[in-house]
Amino acid sequence: MPFPTYHFGPSTFFGLTLRKWLDVPVFILANVAVDIEVLFNYNHHWPVHGYAHTLLGGAVVGAIWGIAAYPLRHFFEKMMRILRIPYQTSFWTMVTSGVLGVWLHVVIDAIYHWDVRIFWPGKAKPLWQLLSQEQVKIVCLGFFIAAAVIYAFAVTSYMKQKKANPDKTQG
Ligand SMILES: [Zn+2]
């Protein structure tokens, strides 16, 4: 499994846990938005982690992703209905979720990859090797399992909501 896929463990866990305040799909898919940089740099430059993988640049990327996702909100709503996850969002929820989603990604990458300058323009890399690469992967897998449990709770609460309010969640 390539390392970027490990991000989906913690992202799904925190996204679902904080689903009352976050836009879950925007938060989770922020991992894809930020790693476009890696795909792009892969063929052009080295090292592959640039400005998008910093707190400052990542906030910009996350905000742009949140704004770009706003027209997709009805599509996300449909997707979440299929997945049986309660979903409500707004423009600012989407922007905030984009930023926080990228930041979670950058923090994990900053532990795992030597070339992430999280505090750019500062040079400090206090997170690098805080855990070994093997440990990061194990923690991420742990979050995957925890996310599955939280998902079961989310579906239960969706079903309860649907029972109490059949018109609103119909589909
Ligand atoms: Zn990354």
Image (tube, rainbow, N blue to C red):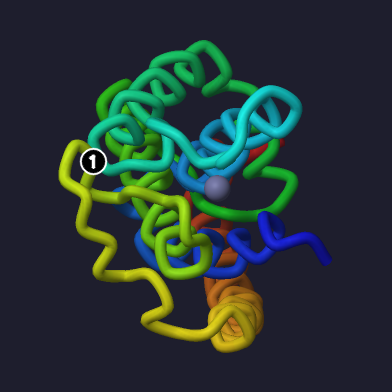
The quadrant of the picture occupied by the N terminus is bottom right
Residue at image x 78%, y 60%? 2
In the image, residue 148 lies at what x, y percent? 65, 76
Q: Is mark 1 within 8 Å of ligand 1?
A: no
Is residue 77 in sight in this rendering?
no
Q: Quick check: 164 left or right of 120?
A: right
Q: Residues within 10 Å of mark 1 (few under 14, many from 20)?
A: some
Kindly identify the amino acid type of the residue bearing the numbered disc 1.
Answer: Trp
Residue at image x 16%, y 45%? 122
Name the one closer to the observer, 134 or 161.
Answer: 134
- Rendered position, 112 above or below 92: below
In the image, residue 14 lies at what x, y percent? 43, 65
To which quarter of the image does residue 79 belong? Answer: top right
Name the one closer to the observer, 93 or 128.
Answer: 128
To which quarter of the image does residue 91 belong? Answer: top left
In the image, residue 29 lies at what x, y percent? 58, 40
- Rendered position, 33 above or below 4: above
- Residue highlighted by disc 1: 120
Is residue 122 in sight in this rendering?
yes
Q: Secondary structure at mark 1?
A: loop
Residue at image x 56%, y 88%? 135
